[in-house]
């Protein structure tokens, strides 16, 4: 018991150092509801844009701006930007590229083809062989949606984009075709966990761990490719499920969810804040605790003796790594105790964190920004936790004036507004730059199906309108925060929705944020919505293309997944095809 107490005191001391605010900082006590209330009324009270309002130039030196922009570009007001100009969207394409794009999009409009693409490719491979099938795919769908197979292959694409003031987001798109939910076979040699509370043992196979280590080297190459082709202005995309066993991420997420549920029990009035008195009373109700440990915990949670404890401090103290030192004192074996990681799982979680830190360090040294992708909701709490950990170090205001690590928020999730508000407050408290990629979401069918199987409410907004409103409100909330608090916050507005882009541009104009202000980046997938990306780039906005790359046979699973995720969008590409045909007709018009 003495050794446990000593270990716990060391853990608490370490947590205490983490939570001490930097010089000149104060602990904010405003609840998430304050920020959310602002977000909820944003659209209702937005003033009309004044096209004559002055625009402020970026506070950062020009050398620190996204370097793919030409300072001679005309920064037209949003009302003068035309997203239906075929010359702007497709003028840089060759005639062959125009014809190929029209063909690819017309095939993608056939829902039967998209739905059964995997089976059709399998049939082609069986009948024609993999060589012929891969050659056809490479010169059609691959060339249209992917940047190439390696750095040399990608360079002409990236050069073309940069000539149009568009930066690259590189994504090594090779994916495993195996199911992430597959159970580890009983005869596989692996890491056996010994959980407490009579839980069943879990196995994390060595193969998964060794693959994760290899993926680190793959992502390093991606970071170096960004550095080589787009120094100081490019992004690399990264998936956490490639760096840790998905089953472990799901376990880690359960821990975080249960810690939040415990905080809700302490927060009896639902205000988001707990007094010291309420904390002590609830803590003693759920845990066996002595006065010494209780005093240490209160110092960690409320170092300035404000008599206020919120979820940010609570979650920082009960992290997945330190949870066992608390749950060992639980009076009852409830959901939190059952979620407690074994010693072996803590080791694996730390290894996963180390892999992420290696890549973040590499990105920071190369001047490359990392976009951490959002994934299935059952993994997302763990991913958010790991990203927050990275942001505290690599986005620290005393380390850099620009963020390196971007988290991704899927706005089709009902809790996104709350999570953004909480993470924004966390960044202010712990002194790091908030940075986010905002998307609508890619796993709607999967999430609703899983919710039905689990007999729990769907985490997805009930209507598309609710998702659109959430997306636009979060974008505006963050842009206004940047305007009020100065440079440092950055967002990637990753959307194919023209209306959302126009709203974001309107807000930037209203707030006096110039088109190339470092706070806002716009991004679309390569091969799609060129009318949006090229128009934004040619008007001086920070425009980017998401560029998947990798060998053809490795990238096919990615292409299939993207086709299925974006089936509805691909079936409604009439505008794309119209603009492509219009540009083709202009070239061969004899009038």
Image (cartoon, rainbow, N blue to C red):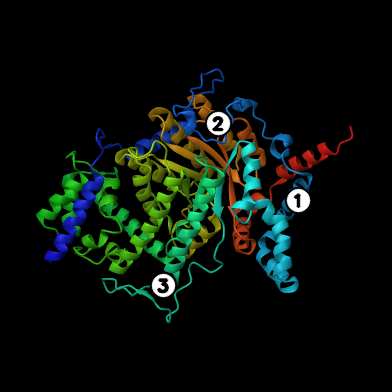
**Residue 123 pos. (x, y %):** 71, 71
**Residue 465 pos. (x, y %):** 55, 43
- Bin the neighbour count of mark 3 within 10 Å (Cα to Cα): few under 14, some 14-19, many 20 and up: few
Q: Is residue 147 visible?
A: no
- Asked if marks 1 and 2 touch (Cβ < 8 Å), the reply is no
Q: Residue furthest right?
A: 590
Residue at point 26% right, 71% down?
A: 197
| Residue designated by label 3 | 206
- Viewer-nearest of discs 1 and 2: 1
**Residue 500 pos. (x, y %):** 56, 37
- Bin the neighbour count of mark 1 within 10 Å (Cα to Cα): few under 14, some 14-19, many 20 and up: some
| Residue designated by label 1 | 100
Q: Gap in Å between the C-alphas at discs 1 and 2?
A: 32 Å
Compared to residue 364, the image places residue 289 above or below, namely below
Q: Gap in Å between the C-alphas at discs 3 and 1?
A: 44 Å
Q: Quadrant of residue 149?
A: bottom right
Compared to residue 196, the image places residue 548 above or below, namely above
Residue at point 49% right, 29% down?
A: 62
Q: Is residue 425 visible?
A: yes
Residue at point 35% right, 56% down?
A: 257
Tell me the number on the disc at residue 538. Answer: none
**Residue 439 pos. (x, y %):** 52, 46
């Amino acid at each position: 018991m003495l050794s446990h107490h000593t270990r716990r005191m060391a853990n608490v001391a370490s947590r205490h150092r983490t939570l001490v605010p930097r010089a000149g900082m104060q602990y904010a006590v405003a609840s998430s509801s304050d920020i959310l209330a602002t977000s909820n009324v944003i659209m209702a009270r937005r003033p009309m844009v004044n096209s004559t309002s002055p625009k402020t130039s970026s506070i950062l030196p020009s050398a620190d701006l996204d370097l793919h922009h030409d300072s001679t570009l005309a920064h037209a007001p949003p009302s003068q930007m035309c997203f239906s100009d075929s010359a702007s969207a497709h003028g840089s394409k060759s005639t062959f590229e125009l014809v190929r794009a029209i063909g690819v999009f017309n095939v993608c409009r056939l829902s039967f083809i998209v739905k059964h693409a995997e089976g059709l490719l399998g049939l082609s491979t069986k009948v024609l062989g993999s060589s012929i099938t891969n050659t056809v795919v490479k010169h059609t769908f691959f060339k249209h949606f992917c940047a190439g197979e390696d750095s040399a292959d990608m360079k002409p694409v990236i050069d073309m984009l940069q000539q149009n003031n568009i930066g690259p987001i590189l994504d090594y798109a090779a994916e495993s075709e195996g199911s992430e939910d597959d159970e580890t076979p009983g005869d596989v040699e692996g890491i056996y966990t010994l959980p407490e509370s009579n839980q069943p043992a879990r196995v994390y196979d060595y193969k998964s761990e060794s693959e994760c280590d290899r993926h680190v080297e793959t992502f390093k190459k991606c970071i170096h490719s960004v550095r080589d082709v787009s120094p100081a202005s490019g992004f690399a995309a990264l998936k956490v499920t490639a760096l840790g066993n998905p089953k472990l991420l799901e376990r880690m997420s359960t821990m975080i969810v249960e810690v939040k549920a415990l905080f809700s029990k302490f927060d009896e009035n639902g205000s988001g804040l707990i007094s010291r008195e309420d904390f002590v009373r609830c803590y003693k109700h759920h845990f066996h605790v002595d006065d010494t440990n209780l005093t240490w915990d209160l110092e960690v949670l409320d170092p300035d003796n404000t008599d206020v404890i919120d979820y940010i401090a609570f979650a920082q103290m009960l992290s997945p790594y330190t949870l066992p030192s608390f749950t060992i004192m639980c009076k009852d074996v409830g959901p939190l105790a059952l979620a407690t990681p074994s010693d072996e799982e803590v080791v694996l979680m730390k290894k996963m964190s180390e892999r992420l830190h290696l890549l973040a360090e590499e990105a920071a040294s190369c001047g490359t920004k990392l976009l951490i992708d959002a994934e299935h909701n059952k993994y997302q709490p763990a991913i958010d936790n790991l990203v927050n950990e990275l942001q505290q170090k690599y986005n620290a205001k005393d380390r850099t004036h620009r963020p390196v690590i971007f988290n991704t928020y899927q706005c089709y999730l009902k809790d996104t507004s709350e999570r953004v508000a909480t993470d924004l407050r966390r960044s202010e408290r712990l002194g790091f730059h908030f940075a986010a990629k905002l998307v609508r979401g890619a796993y709607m069918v999967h999430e609703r199906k899983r919710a039905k199987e689990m007999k729990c409410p769907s985490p997805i907004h009930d209507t598309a309108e609710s998702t659109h409103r959430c997306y636009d409100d979060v974008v505006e909330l963050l842009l206004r925060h940047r305007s009020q608090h100065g440079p440092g916050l950055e967002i990637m507005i990753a959307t194919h929705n023209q209306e959302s882009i126009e709203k974001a541009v309107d807000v930037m104009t209203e707030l006096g944020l110039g088109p190339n202000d470092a706070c806002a980046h716009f991004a679309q997938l390569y091969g799609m919505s060129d009318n949006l990306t090229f128009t934004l780039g040619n008007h001086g906005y920070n425009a980017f293309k998401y560029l998947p790359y990798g060998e053809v046979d490795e990238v096919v699973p990615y292409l299939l997944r993207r086709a299925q995720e974006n089936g509805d969008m691909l079936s409604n590409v009439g505008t794309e095809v119209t603009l492509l045909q219009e540009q083709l007709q202009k070239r061969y018009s004899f009038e």
